[in-house]
Amino acid sequence: MTAPVSHPEQDGRGQDGRGQIIDGKAFARNLTATIAREVEIFHDRHGITPGLAVVLVGNDPASEVYVRNKALQTHRTGMLSFMHMLPESTSQAQLLNLIDRLNRDPEIHGILVQLPLPKHIDATLVTNAIDPRKDVDGLGEVNAGRLSLGLEGIVPCTPLGCLLLLRHELGSLRGLDALVIGASNLVGKPMAQLLLNEGCTVSIAHIDTRDTPALARRADILVVATGHRGLVRGDWIKPGATVIDVGITRIPTEGGKTRLVGDVAFDEARHVAARITPVPGGVGPMTIACLLRNTLTAARLCAGD
């Protein structure tokens, strides 16, 4: 039996006894700047400007803002952005025809279809219609399969962002106990696979897990992605753990305004954890930065780089 791996850098609480805040916004800003430099180098080498096509079906105001922000960030890195804003009435056949055209378009290196889709459209069918080399969301069966086998591929943006933050904060993750709360195809499952590939001992908790708090109290790394605000309390957390809160819920406040909160009771958790991501300003900015990273990766695959 091998000796446990020591990670003294995890004991990082400040003098006030509270855990350090992981600044995802600053990390994403630095990552985006790096991507912009690499896009310029890639263009000089191949004469190719990476292009990202984003498809939105329907008129959800929050999704429209999010999609436009993606387009703005794409332009800022020197990449091309192609927006396709389709009405709610768009049929599945029409959407699949658009994806087929984008698959064959040499200017398009990445394709992202904003989820969720209207109920009359099969999201799985649409996702798998995207050329795996252009699947910058990493949600198609080919890229999901490559991730599960530990092979090179395009990784879903949010889990990838979480992993980059963890590597930056902790260095090597090998030998650490990790718990992912939430088993979605979008975050939970790929996150668990990424952690497993890093050498962590990984557990996944979901709606049928009998004693999630007990599992959480053993975890050096806790990633929470359930969409249930304040689910994880301070007494769930192992002292000195690193907590990544993927959840985001908008709640009303006084005066008719709203604010964003995560899946973790932040103030409670910060008195126990060594490091924790805030909401907002933690994982969210990393998702868009990793989308840009994936688009450059897709362009490199196309160029044989």
Image (cartoon, grey):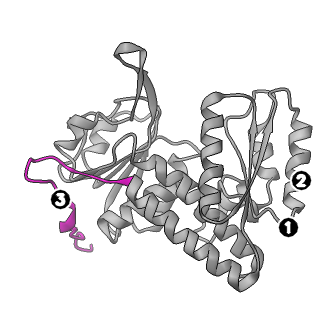
Res 233 → quadrant: top left
Q: Earlier in the sequence, mark 3 or mark 2?
A: 3
Expressed as whole percent of the image width and height from the top left, the position of residue 185 reads 59, 46
Q: Is residue 4 above or below residue 143?
A: below
Residue found 79% across the figure and 62% down from its top: 108
Other-residue count near label 2 (Cα within 10 Å), few / some / many at <14 / 14–19 / ≥20: some
- Is disc 2 placed on a helix, strand or loop? helix
Res 168 → quadrant: bottom left
Q: Which of the image's four quarters has the N terminus?
A: bottom left
Residue found 36% across the figure and 18% down from its top: 253
Between disc 3 and disc 1, the foreground one is 1
> Marks 3 and 1, Cα distance to the nearest angstrom?
48 Å
Residue found 23% across the figure and 69% down from its top: 4
Q: Earlier in the sequence, mark 1 or mark 2?
A: 2
Query: What residue is shown with label 3?
Result: 12
Query: What residue is shown with label 1?
Result: 106
Lateral position of residue 30 relative to residue 269, left or right? right
Q: Earlier in the sequence, mark 3 or mark 1?
A: 3
**Which label belongs to residue 100?**
2
Out of 134 and 152, give the one closest to the viewer. Answer: 134
Q: Amino acid at mark 2?
A: Asp
